[in-house]
Image (spheres, rainbow, N blue to C red):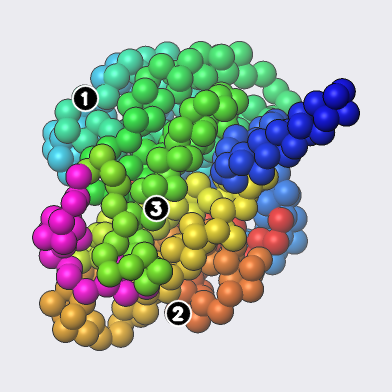
Amino acid sequence: MRRTALLAAAAALVAGLLAWPADAAPGSFVHPGVTVSKGQLDFTRSKVNSGAQPWKGAFDRMMASKYADLNRTPEPRAVVECGSYSNPNHGCTDEREDAIAAYTQALAWYVTRDERHARKAIELMDAWSAVIRDHANSNAPLQTGWAGSSWPKAAEIIKYTYTGTWANSGRFATMLRDVYLPEVINGSHSNGNWELSMMEAAVGISVFLEDKASYDKAMAKFRTRTAAYVYLASDGELPKTVPSQNLNTREKIVRYWQGQSAFADGLSQETCRDFTHTGYGLSAISHIAETSRIQGQDLYATDVGERLRHGLGFHAKYQLAAAAPAWLCGGSLKLGLGPVPEVGHNALANRLEHAMTNTETLTMRGRPAGTNNLFVAWETLSHGDNPA
């Protein structure tokens, strides 16, 4: 009887392990571990210090930017108010750019070991954590997602690699927990790039806070939204949808997909809106997949990777000036994908050895990649051909 009970308990344990979701929070979080790992940082530092390209050129471009300026003065606000397309813009640009600057200064610190950059990153983070209390108006969720994607990247590098003092790191964590996370964690019913950017922030913040419950919640929303953002032929006649959006007819789905009624591998829910917003969505997918990989779960080997691979390839083809067929957005496309392919290209083409000719051509043409001034920054430097 005892042996039977032990066998039953063992079987239950195995079943539980097998049922454990592939994208659940790790047993122990890896730090630094938001989009960029210590191994990647070490690789980057060695290449820059040896003068190797494209990393040295990417570093020089970063250091020549306004974000690396050691004289930068933070511009925090208690309430950041952002309407549609940041109109009104009460602190929207300041917040996003100060967050990118904190990340830039953290990268500069790691590569150069010049403590002035670490202290500047801390100054920027401290200034905002001392003041900000809320985000307001219609773009508040998206704004919070954009800024909230950059802050934890900076904080992870400083907290886990800088040996100096960051006295207010606890206050910064409280800011992320109380001001940013509640705004993004429950997602959005808007276009896909909104929720993907919001989940990028939620995942990064969860890693910094070591908040497993929020990590799991954000990852679950991310998986659902990614499947509903990039179409694969295996989805069937129509794209997948987010259940809460009640897109229960073909007419509703077509309208949500910007009037597009024919579907092909890699088409995005926002392709026929414009490539710029599509780039935001694809970039967020790559960032979350990269964070998940660092934390021990490789989503690139799942349907997330397939959707990202086809999404990048589909849009790279037209960004490289291929003519749009009549079935696609009426034969008229609004280009402008932005500096977004590096992370996905490195993971899928270099690590997993997928053939990605158009994506590779676009990636090489865009080097050294800069920033979109929203939440993407310096990805040739951090991820270009980075094997770590």
**Position above or below: 30 against 346:** above
Q: Farthest residue toward the front? A: 1
Residue 317 lies in quadrant: bottom left
**For mark 3, what is the residue?**
226
**For mark 1, what is the residue?**
136
What segment carries the magenta color? 246-268
Q: Residues within 10 Å of mark 1 (few under 14, many from 20)?
A: some
Residue occupying image coordinates x 13% and y 77%: 330
Mark before the other along the chain sequence, 1 or 2: 1
Q: Secondary structure at mark 2?
A: helix
Mark before the other along the chain sequence, 3 or 2: 3
Q: Quadrant of the C terminus?
A: bottom right
Residue 89 lies in quadrant: top left
Query: How far from the left and from the top, in percent, is residue 140?
Result: 25, 31
Query: How far from the left and from the top, in percent, is residue 221?
Result: 40, 40
Distance between mark 3 and mark 2 Cα atoms:
22 Å
Q: Amino acid at mark 3?
A: Thr
Q: Quadrant of the N terminus?
A: top right
Q: Nearer the viewer, residue 165 or 40?
A: 40
Q: Residues within 10 Å of mark 3 (few under 14, many from 20)?
A: many
Q: Looking at the magenta stretch, what is its main secondary structure?
A: loop
